[in-house]
């Protein structure tokens, strides 16, 4: 059974940093595209960053230049290092494991709150 477990969220002041982690169980990690999304109540979930099984990385929106995604295939874990956090980064952050025409799994989310 596949499970994604996020951790690392919390409350931080503007300008601070957080590191999110997502551990994937179920033997799919190494062949998955891993991504981080975020969602604010009343808005659509938006893609923040993704990393392919081969290590190719893309950032989206305001994450560019501030966030860094990485993966450790030995630990079945993907990370999101978030620096220079701003109040507008406040959201629930979700981990996603995806493979084209095969599967699409989500974690339960972790809350990130940035105070001004």
Image: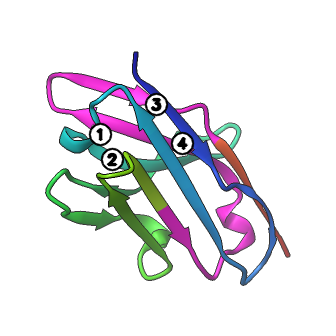
CB-based contact (under 8 Å), mark 3 and mark 4: yes
Q: Mark 2 or mark 4, which has the lower sequence index?
A: 2
| Horizontal side, residue 67 vs residue 28: left or right | right
Q: Work out whether mark 2 precedes mark 3 in sequence or the reverse, and give the earlier one.
A: 2
Dot label at residue 94: 4
Q: Is residue 36 above or below residue 1?
A: below
Q: What mark, if any, has residue 106 been given in the picture?
A: 3
- Circle 3: is it few (<14), some (14-19), or many (20+) Cα within 10 Å? some
Q: Mark 2 and 1 residues: CB-CB less than 8 Å, in contact? A: yes
Alpha carbon of mark 2 to alpha carbon of mark 1: how far? 8 Å
Within 10 Å of disc 1 (Cα), the crowding (few <14, some 14-19, many 20+) is many
Image coordinates for residue 61, horizontal then vertical, percent: 43, 66
Residue occupying image coordinates x 66% and y 44%: 110
Secondary structure beneath dot 2 equals strand
Q: Which badge, 2 or 1, is on the more N-terminal residue?
A: 1
Residue at numbered disc 2:
34
Between residue 42 and residue 86, name the one nearer to us.
Answer: 86
Q: CA distance from mark 2 to mark 4?
A: 11 Å
Q: Which residues are magenta?
A: 80-109
Does the segment drawn in magenta span residue 12? no
Numbered badge on residue 29: 1
């Amino acid at each position: 059974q596949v499970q994604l477990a996020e951790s690392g969220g919390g409350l931080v002041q503007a300008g601070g940093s957080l590191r999110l982690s997502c551990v994937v169980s179920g033997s799919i990690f190494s062949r998955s595209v891993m991504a981080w999304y975020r969602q604010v109540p009343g808005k659509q979930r938006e893609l923040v960053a993704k990393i392919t099984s081969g290590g190719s990385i893309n950032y989206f929106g305001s994450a560019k230049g501030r966030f860094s995604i990485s993966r450790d295939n030995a630990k079945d874990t993907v990370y999101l290092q978030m620096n220079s956090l701003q109040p507008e980064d406040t959201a629930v952050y979700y981990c996603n494991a995806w493979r084209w025409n095969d599967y699409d799994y989500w974690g339960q989310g972790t809350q990130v709150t940035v105070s001004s």
